[in-house]
Image (spheres, helix red, strand yellow):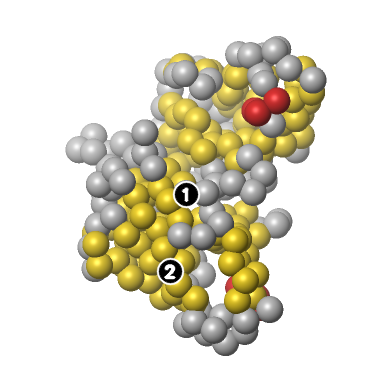
């Protein structure tokens, strides 16, 4: 599986957009980019995923560069409850069997009042 | 919304005790997973199951066993708890991939923080 690189930590002012970068320069054509987050002492929460097109849902937007070597997760209006560790994960398209997710160190996002 | 529940949020056990961690999902998912999460080590897969009564070892199965008697329930068993099994245990579920090969999203439970004394 392709490795990912994320900043260790970031701060964001409440109400502003939070832009979390992820580098996945060794991604291959059959690998998805997934984003999860984990609020302290809770289980990881799925946010969004994409293959090559930009994606948006009720939680966030995912921008994937044309060469697919990096992506950015955007939380449009960060709130204090968005304070969490954000994980960018690259995982292959499944061949049909279950696959584990490999979580790296993630980015600790702190939303400041 | 997918819901994955785990039987306990916090658990304290003594060395040598048999420990059962239960996980239930309500979305009719075929795949279920047990991970443990430790500081600096990330999530590590213990076991997973892709169907009732089917199970596969993950990266760190030693000291653990699992049971999947019903589709919605996946149990993790610590036969004889040891202090190095003190950890956060996370259960997840997902559908199998579709015909297009798309990797299905895993949904996680709230976690069980186990302390073995």
The residue marked by circle 1 belongs to what chain?
B
Tell me the element at label 1.
loop
Image position of A34 with respect to B45: above or below: above
Using the rendered image of the protein, determine whether residue B86 is visible from the camera's viewpoint.
Answer: no
Question: Residue B75 location, x and y as percent?
Answer: 38, 66
The crowd level at tag 2 (other Cα within 10 Å; few <14, some 14-19, many 20+) is many
Q: Quadrant of residue A3?
A: top right
Using the rendered image of the protein, determine whether residue B21 is visible from the camera's viewpoint.
Answer: yes
Image position of A110 with respect to B94: above or below: above
| Circle 2 residue | B76
The crowd level at tag 1 (other Cα within 10 Å; few <14, some 14-19, many 20+) is many
Determine contact: label 1, label 2, CB under 8 Å. Answer: no
Question: Residue B18 location, x and y as percent?
Answer: 49, 82
Q: Give the mark nearer the N terminus: 1 vs 2.
A: 2
In this rendering, position of residue A81 left or right of residue A89: right
Which is more toward the observer, A103 or B15?
B15
Tell me the element at label 2.
strand
Q: Quadrant of residue A22?
A: top right
Question: Residue A9 location, x and y as percent?
Answer: 76, 34
Image position of A31 with respect to A104: above or below: above
Residue B109 is marked as: 1
Number of labelled discs? 2
Residue depicted at x 65% and y 28%: A81
Q: Quadrant of residue A8?
A: top right
Image position of A102 with respect to B1: above or below: below
The residue marked by circle 2 belongs to what chain?
B
Quarter occupied by the C terminus of chain A: top right
Residue depicted at x 66% and y 19%: A78
């Amino acid at each position: 599986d392709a490795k990912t690189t994320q900043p260790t930590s970031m701060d964001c002012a409440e109400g502003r957009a939070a832009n979390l970068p992820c580098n996945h320069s060794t991604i291959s054509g059959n690998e998805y980019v997934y984003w999860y987050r984990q609020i302290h002492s809770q289980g990881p929460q799925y946010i969004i995923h994409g293959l090559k097109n930009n994606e948006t849902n009720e939680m966030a937007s995912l921008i994937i560069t044309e060469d697919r070597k990096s992506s950015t997760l955007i939380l449009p209006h960060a709130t204090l409850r968005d304070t969490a560790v954000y994980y960018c994960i690259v995982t292959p398209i499944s061949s049909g069997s279950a696959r584990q997710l490999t979580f790296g160190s993630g980015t600790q996002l702190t939303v400041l009042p | 919304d997918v819901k994955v529940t785990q039987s306990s949020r916090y658990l304290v056990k003594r060395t040598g005790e048999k420990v059962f961690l239960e996980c239930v999902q309500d979305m009719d998912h075929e795949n279920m997973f047990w991970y443990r999460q430790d500081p600096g080590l990330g999530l590590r897969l213990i076991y997973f199951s892709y169907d009732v009564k089917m199970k596969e070892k993950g990266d760190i199965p030693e000291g653990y066993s699992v049971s999947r008697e019903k589709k919605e329930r996946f149990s993790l068993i610590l036969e004889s708890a040891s202090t190095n099994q003190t950890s956060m245990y996370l259960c997840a579920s997902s559908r199998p991939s579709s015909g297009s090969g798309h990797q299905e999203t895993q949904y996680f439970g709230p976690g069980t923080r186990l302390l073995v004394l």
